[in-house]
Image (cartoon, grey):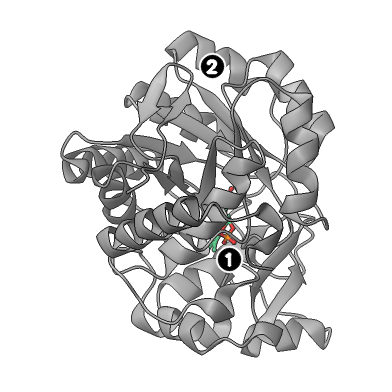
Amino acid sequence: MFELPELNIGGLKAKYPIIQGGMAIRISGSKLAGAVAREGGIGVIAGIAMSPKELEKEIKEAREKSEGKGLLGINVLYAVSNFAELIKTGMKAGIDLVLQGAGFSRDIYDWGRKFNVPIVPIVSSASLAKLAQKLGAAAVVVEGFEAGGHLGTDRPMLDILPEVVKAVKIPVIAAGGILHGQDIYRVLKMGAQGVQMGTRFAASKESGAPDNYKQLYLEAKPEDSILINSPVGLPGRGIRNFLTERLFAGEKIKINKCTKCMKKCSQTFCIREALENAQEGRIKEGIIFAGKRVAEIKDILSVKEIFDNLKKEFSEACRQNLAVESILP
Ligand SMILES: Cc1cc2nc3c(=O)[nH]c(=O)nc-3n(C[C@H](O)[C@H](O)[C@H](O)COP(=O)(O)O)c2cc1C
């Protein structure tokens, strides 16, 4: 049996090089993050739309569920208005590391030094990866356009990854379109030190998505993976549904109550309300974020089963010494 290697980030060690991507709103809470950490990965709580109190509580509960194993992170999008408050709350609550996407913060590195917490930005180019390294990032997540959620690029991850690996010395984590152990084998061979996976974990027993949301994942066909224009000014990848069809038709969607939750918002619709609708089961009126390979998800598994499969598939790929070109799309 070939073992998945450890992942070292800023002096911290995870038994397996697998980060469960932060998934808003409340898709990755304490239950999912704690289960991932318990299996030896890095579980990540998505902080957006949480109050500082709620985030603190989620961190405490995730820590209990992890049974002292693995590592725990928080993910807060730069685009949210209370970004600084949430990040500092997580740091004070003893989170192991902080991931940050949807925009680029320079201040976060000072906060990381102050609280001794490694910062891992999510980037989509070698130039941003280099800047992050210069500012003090402990690692970078390279996210391609296959990823679910808000996107910073229209390029495939496998195109960007070699550029970033060449440009920086800190660990590089590949994100977007990773579903199987063979995918992990492939990106590690290309120089990544680990992976970040969203869609596979959103479709887990422990994810915060309701059953009808998970059912949409199981029913999705390849052509149902679509890009919307998020009001925060970025494209977002999700699954076609009633709401996205209305958006594509140019319909104005009523905003019930604006809480000014984003630093910048075009107000074409309320992304927070749409994500909350989805997480609360009103899926027709919600945005269901999911990655481009969602149609390959055929079952809702427990986090343990997902890890067992990834370990088995990775070992098999090593045993066969698969050529990078021969693996998957
Ligand atoms: C339902 C869902 C919600 C997401 N929300 C966030 C988020 O709040 N912040 C973030 O940085 N990334 C978010 N992402 C991206 C994931 O963290 C991860 O990088 C991405 O899903 C990886 O691609 P994959 O889905 O192909 O595995 C989200 C992804 C999904 C599927």
**Quick one: 213 or 298, which is closer to the camera?**
298
Location of residue 328 (image quadrant): bottom right
| SS for callout 1 | loop
Image position, residue 155 (x, y; %) = 82, 55
Residue drawn 63% across and 90% down?
242
Residue 15 place in picture, x, y as percent: 33, 35
> Mark 1 = which residue?
257
Query: Camera-side residue: 297 or 99?
Result: 297
- How far apart are labels 2 and 1 at the CA level? 32 Å
Q: In this view, does 66 lie to the left or right of 77?
A: left
Q: How crowded is mark 1: few (under 14 residues within 10 Å), some or many (20 or more)?
A: few
Task: Give the residue displayed 77% in from the left and 22% down from the top.
Answer: 131
Q: Residue 111 carries which label?
A: 2
Q: Considering only vertical position in the picture, is 185 above or below 240?
A: above
Q: Quadrant of the C terminus?
A: bottom right
Q: Can residue 24 be seen in this view?
A: no
Label 2 vs 1, first from the N-terminus: 2
Q: Which amino acid does label 1 sit on?
A: Lys
Residue at 51% from the left image edge and 65% from the top image edge:
199
Q: Quick check: can you spot residue 141? A: yes
Q: Which residue lies furthest to the front in this view?
A: 320
In the shown orientation, is residue 322 left or right of residue 253? left
> Foreground mark, 2 or 1?
2
